[in-house]
Image (cartoon, rainbow, N blue to C red):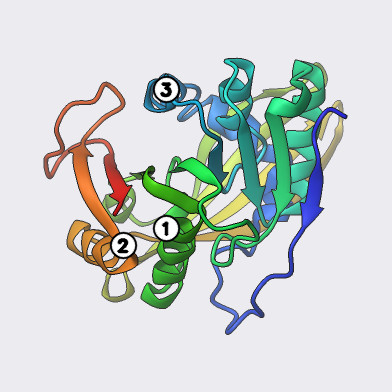
Amino acid sequence: MLFSVSEHKRPKARSRDEGWRGWDDYARFYDWENQRTIGRRDVAFWLRFVAGKPGRVLELGCGTGRVSVPLARAGVRVVGVDRSPAMLTRARARGRRAKLGTTFQLVRADIRALPFVSGSFQIVIAPYGIIQSVLSDRDLVSVLTTAARVLEPGGLLGIDVVADVPRWAQYRNRVQLRGRMGRHTHVTLIESVVQQPARHLTRFAQRFVTRIGSRSSEHRFDLQFRTPSLRQVTNHLGRAGFTVDALLGDYAGNRWHKQAEAMIIVARRI
């Protein structure tokens, strides 16, 4: 069996303000956009992060398998978790193409309530802003607490926060990207950004206009991100049972500073 896919019941949505909304619709365009933004810039970092560790690795919010598939291809035993069926469908196809065998597993679940046995992973990773899709302190605490539970004592947690999201200028209906998707489809991304500084929220209203020959269609959805401060994250990590080992500012492993491109927190379960 190439890999397994299972489903776990998720906590009921407590409000309409949920960071998981929009990702099913976005799945079709996720790889296209990310090839033009983050690309594979962070993949080498995560490969180094897990290198030499014999235990299983859990990726929170694995999406289309952009990070987890390269890890599995390198021989790492990876389990990817995501809430979006559409994202997991694409990850499943990526896994098949890579012929990964049992090193790659997918589970549909909510990262606030992981459906795994306690202590079953050596490493948990949260790449490229996945915790920013968690829109409240309460939910962030749930993510960190459940991550601590599934880690073995001394296990590592790696969190990548996209630090510049709160600094994005607000704009409306700006053409951000253009290009081909496959052989025949031309795509234009038209985007609006709204900041809510008091709530640390950034809202991206995205319109993907696709054209094949003379036929065009438009796909609209919103994505919301909350960017917690470094103090908030480290305080919650401590309460969840972690100690912070390192704070990095880029994918080369340099130390974090206030203008760094990323905020990568390496924590260890006590």
Secondary structure at numbered mark 2: loop
Marks 1 and 3, how far apart at CA: 27 Å
Secondary structure at numbered mark 1: helix
Please indicate whether residue 97 sits to the left or right of residue 31 in the image. right
Secondary structure at numbered mark 3: loop
Callout 2 amino acid: Gly
The answer to whether residue 172 of the structure is visible from this angle is no
The answer to whether residue 168 of the structure is visible from this angle is yes
The N terminus appears in which quarter of the rendering? top right
Q: Nearer the viewer, mark 1 or mark 3?
A: 1
Instruction: Give the mark, 1 or 3, whose residue is nearer the N terminus.
Output: 3
Q: Are marks 1 and 3 in contact (CB under 8 Å)?
A: no
Give the residue number, with chain letter if any, for mark 1: 148
Q: Residue at x 42, y 22 (%)?
A: 41
Q: Are marks 1 and 2 in contact (CB under 8 Å)?
A: yes
Q: Residue at x 60, y 62 (%)?
A: 20
Give the residue number, with chain letter if any, for mark 2: 241
Callout 3 amino acid: Arg
Residue 245: quarter of image: top left
